[in-house]
Image (tube, helix red, strand yellow):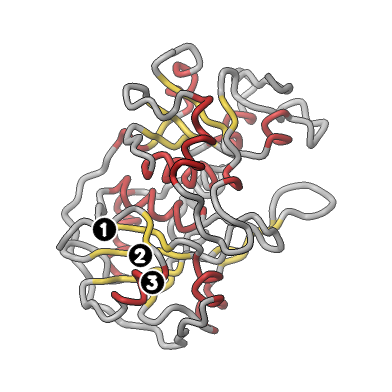
Amino acid sequence: MNDIPLIVTTEWLAEHLDDPKLRIVDATVFMKFPEAGGPPEVESGRASYENGHIPGAVYADIVGELSDTDSALPFTVPSRETFIEKMTELGIGDGLYTVIYDQNALVGESIASSYWASRLSWQMRYEGFGQVAILEGGLQKWLAEERPLSTETPDYPKANFSGQRDDGMLATKEEVQKAMDDEQTILINSLSPEEYAGTQTDDPRSGHIPGSENVFFGLHADEQTKALYDDDKLRALFEHTGALDPGKKVIAYCGGGIAATWNALILNKLGQPNVAVYDGSMNEWASDPSCPIVKSTK
């Protein structure tokens, strides 16, 4: 089996639908921020999956089954044993390859980003599932091209898995604290310029980690077609940060460790392999009074 790219097109997936070694995963989560402010409303995409999905796809529950539900922080990685058990039960493992899709980042937003798919892809590669890609443009692009849907739930046999965890892909709070004063590590804040600056709210713990650069996750794809921009345009978004230097390590973060995986994936696509995601992100950082926060633009 040949290595697949980090991101595949709808055309590519349509041509490979009948491959017995392919597993397709619907990782849809519906998240919406209330107009009055406050924490986001999060809903599983399972019901939507049951109403129609890409033929052959199984559903992976990031919110309920593939996050640490005992953690005080939302969406953080579950135990390795839990994750591997759920993935292999879905039929994903050795000798197979996986394509993941979602239905865009946020409900009602035009921003084109498959950060739920990139989150699951990151979790899989962190635990050692190497043959995994995400679908460019997700289900929205697939539907816009009038490609088929199915309501059948496939029943794949449980897979075997022998991969190893890649600890370098996950950054802890302590590693981020050290990175603030390390010229060899680039910190990338993946949130909007307003969130980065801390101007969206009066919360004194809003803003960004000192020394971090801002690359908004919503800048990488066309809002109408959902297609990614070409590599030259993507590269230009990161150029000012130093994150493209293969001699540097990059740590991406956001609010809860989801959007950061989209930036990490794009950096990987652009040839930067040394990218970790701060899993706790600002949810964890802001909750610790000893962690400094900058509340203004640079």
Mark 1 or 2: in front is 1
First in sequence: mark 3 vs mark 2 = 3
Query: Residue 229, how many percent across, how many down?
Result: 51, 51
| Circle 3 or circle 2, nearest the eye | 3
Residue at (51%, 35%) from the top-left corner?
236
Q: Nearer the viewer, residue 46 or 277?
A: 277
Q: Name the residue under label 2.
A: 99
Residue at image mark 1: 4
Q: In which quarter of the image is the N terminus?
A: bottom left
Q: Is mark 2 on a helix, strand or loop?
A: strand
Mark 1: amino acid? Ile
What residue appears at the point 27 percent right and 40 percent down from the top-left corner?
A: 166
**In the image, residue 56 above or below residue 60:** below
Asked if marks 1 and 3 touch (Cβ < 8 Å), the reply is no
Name the side, left or right, on which 96 lies relative to 85.
Answer: left
- Indicate left or right for 245 with 128 as reference: right
**Local secondary structure at mark 1:** loop
Q: Label 2 neighbourhood size at 10 Å, few (<14), some (14-19), many (20+)?
A: many
Mark 3 falls on what kind of element? helix
Image location of residue 58, percent across then percent down: 39, 74
Nearer to us in this view, 84 or 249 = 249
| Category of crowding for the residue at label 3, using alpha-carbon neighbours closer than 10 angstroms: few (below 14), some (14–19), many (at least 20) | few
- Tell me if residue 87 comes above or below residue 289 in the rendering: below
Tag 1 near tag 2, CB within 8 Å: yes
Label 1: few (<14), some (14–19) or many (≥20) C-alpha neighbours in 10 Å: some
Dot 1 or dot 3: first in sequence order is: 1
The amino acid pointed to by label 3 is: Glu
Could you tell me the amino acid type at mark 2?
A: Val
Residue that numbered label 3 is attached to = 11
Residue 120 picture location, percent across and down? 42, 55
